[in-house]
Every structure is written in C-alpha cells, then in structure tokens.
Amino acid sequence: MHDPLSPHRHDPNPNPPSPSPTFRLRLPDGSERAVTVADLRRMPATTAPDCYIVSTGHGTSGPFTFGGVLLLDLLAAYMAPDQTWTQVEVVSGDGFGARLYRQELEQSGRTAPILLAYDIDGGPMTRQQGLVRLIVPGETDDALKQVKWLGNITVIG
Ligand SMILES: Nc1nc2c(c(=O)[nH]1)N[C@H]1C(S)=C(S)[C@@H](COP(=O)(O)O)O[C@H]1N2
Ligand SMILES: [Mo]
C-alpha cells in the first residue's frame, strides 16, 4: 500500500471514508485516545481567516475562515508539559497524510495557525466538507497538507 506520508500528487477525494468524525490520538508514551468533535469544542477555539485550498483537481477555492483547535493546543491538552516530541503524523481514513515538524507548528503561531478545523465560515463543517480537517494556512503546494477526515494523529517522540 502507498505510504500516506510519502510525497504524493493526489486527485482530491470528494468522498468521506466513514460517517464518523472521531479520530484517534496516539501519544509518544504509546497511549491512545479517541477524540470527538465535542472534545475539540471544549478546548480553546482559534480562527484562521483568508485560507485558500489550492486544489490540483478543481482549482483554488476560498477564501474561507476556518475555526477549530490549534494542533498545539490539542497536544497540550493530552500531553504532559515535559513530554518530548519532534513531529506529528496526521493521516485520514482514506489514506492521505501529512507530517508536521514541531518547529513548523511552533513558528506558525497565531498568524498562520495550524488547526484541526470543525467550522467553516462561521458554521459547522459537514463530514462531506472534511470534518475534522487539518488546516495549514501557510501551505499552498497543491493542498497536500489540508488533510480532510482525520483518522489518526500520531505524535512522535
Ligand atoms: N483525506 C483527504 N484529504 C485530502 C485529499 C484526499 O484525497 N483525502 N486530497 C488533498 C488534495 S490533493 C487536495 S487538492 C485537497 C482538496 O480539497 P477540497 O476537496 O476541499 O477542494 O484536499 C487535500 N486533502
Ligand atoms: Mo491537491
């Protein structure tokens, strides 16, 4: 099977792999949690305005305002502050993934916030639209980091 994290050109898949937006979070200590949209909505919310999805399949769409949780805030909610980690793998249920390095996450800060998005333009994103979707506002390379339908997030120590 194709490694979801290796470089890929990809025709964007319009079809959610399953009805459920719950995803699994795997931590460096080997523990696993199921994370629901309700869990995300209880965490601090962050908004990313003026986002474009630069699609290889159907051209650029946007601008969109995405709302959700900073990936860094999710990690802070589930990991001890002294936990060592270097990178995060984000993979969808349909086998599409992106790897994010700690430096990229920390440098994007709040100007180009890297989000797990559940809202789009002020309302809830549908599963069809990508719920829960990784949004990397600084990425314009064929939308290869704008992962729809998060299935697993693995934090590497
Ligand atoms: N889960 C998943 N996410 C994905 C893809 C995919 O096939 N599956 N395709 C990517 C690519 S290559 C593009 S261009 C965009 C398309 O996003 P859109 O359908 O919202 O326009 O989604 C990205 N995220
Ligand atoms: Mo793409």
Image (cartoon, rainbow, N blue to C red):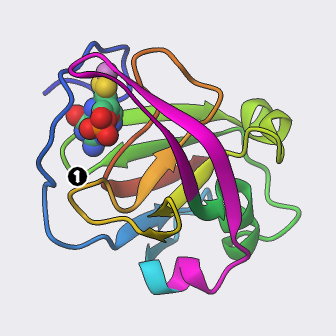
Residue 126 or residue 105, whichever sits in front: 126
Side of 114 where 116 appears, left or right: left
* Residue 88 drawn above or below residue 5: below
> Where is residue 125 shown, x and y percent of the image?
37, 65
Residue 96 visible? The answer is: no
x 47%, y 86%: residue: 38
Q: Residue furthest right?
A: 82
Label 1: element kind = loop
Q: What range of the chain is rendered magenta?
A: 39-66
- Dividing the image into four quarters, tell me where ligand 1 lies: top left
Q: Residue at x 59, y 64 (%)?
A: 68
- Viewer-proximal residue, 137 or 145? 137
Q: Is residue 27 above or below residue 139?
A: below
Q: Is residue 71 left or right of residue 80?
A: left
Examine the image and state in which quarter residue 129 appears: bottom left
Task: Name the residue: 48% across, 14% down.
Answer: 141
Residue type indicated by callout 1: Gly
